[in-house]
Amino acid sequence: MPPEYLAFFDEFNHQRFYEAHDVLEALWLPSRQAPNGEFYKGLIQIAGAFVHLQSDRKGPAVALLKLAEFNLQSYPDLHNGLDLGALRSLLHRWLVALEDGRFNPLRFGPPPRLTVKSPSSSSS
């Protein structure tokens, strides 16, 4: 797995969402038209959404989470070591809560975490 991809998860899980966005963008830009282009773009959009949530800007966060859902929809439930099925469920819960005005996912409990499995246990 590319080091930028792994660094994305480290930055995201330490709530350094802008840095997560930035590090993965370095991988995405040259591969936008490649098979993983939309996958990386979706992850970047999730990180961007959380940049907005850190400042309680729910509208832009919702818009980015919806774009991320769209960009990740064509990938299998397990892709590049990431459980996209679980991530899609999490995105849906965050979107419902944000759109209903119930909570900001950064303020209600433990921070969001994304886990990538080792290459030996992933497919695609």
Image: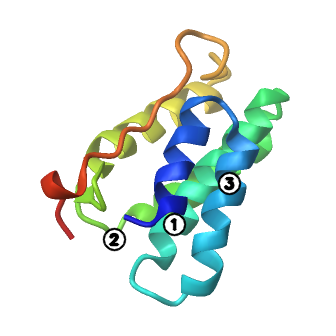
**x and y percent of residue 80 in the render?**
30, 62
90 horizontally vs 82: left or right: right
CA separation, marks 2 and 1?
13 Å
Amino acid, disc 3: His
**Residue on which disc 2 sits:** 74
Amino acid, disc 1: Tyr
Q: Which quadrant, please, contains the C terminus?
A: bottom left
Q: How crowded is mark 2: few (under 14 residues within 10 Å), some or many (20 or more)?
A: few
Number of marks in the rendered image: 3
Amino acid, disc 2: Ser
Q: Give the mark nearer the N terminus: 1 vs 3.
A: 3
Residue at 37% x, 38% y is 115
**x and y percent of residue 41 in the render?**
57, 67
Name the one closer to the observer, 116 or 58: 116
Determine the secondary structure under disc 1.
helix
CA separation, marks 1 and 3?
10 Å
Q: Is residue 12 above or below residue 109?
A: below
CA separation, marks 2 and 3?
21 Å
**Residue on which disc 3 sits:** 21
Q: Which mark is residue 57?
A: none
**x and y percent of residue 11 in the render?**
61, 40
Q: How crowded is mark 1: few (under 14 residues within 10 Å), some or many (20 or more)?
A: many
**Residue on which disc 1 sits:** 40
Determine the secondary structure under disc 3.
helix
Q: In this view, does 113 lie above or below 73?
A: above
**x and y percent of residue 30 in the render?**
61, 85
Q: Which residue is most to the top?
A: 109
Residue at 15% x, 56% y is 120
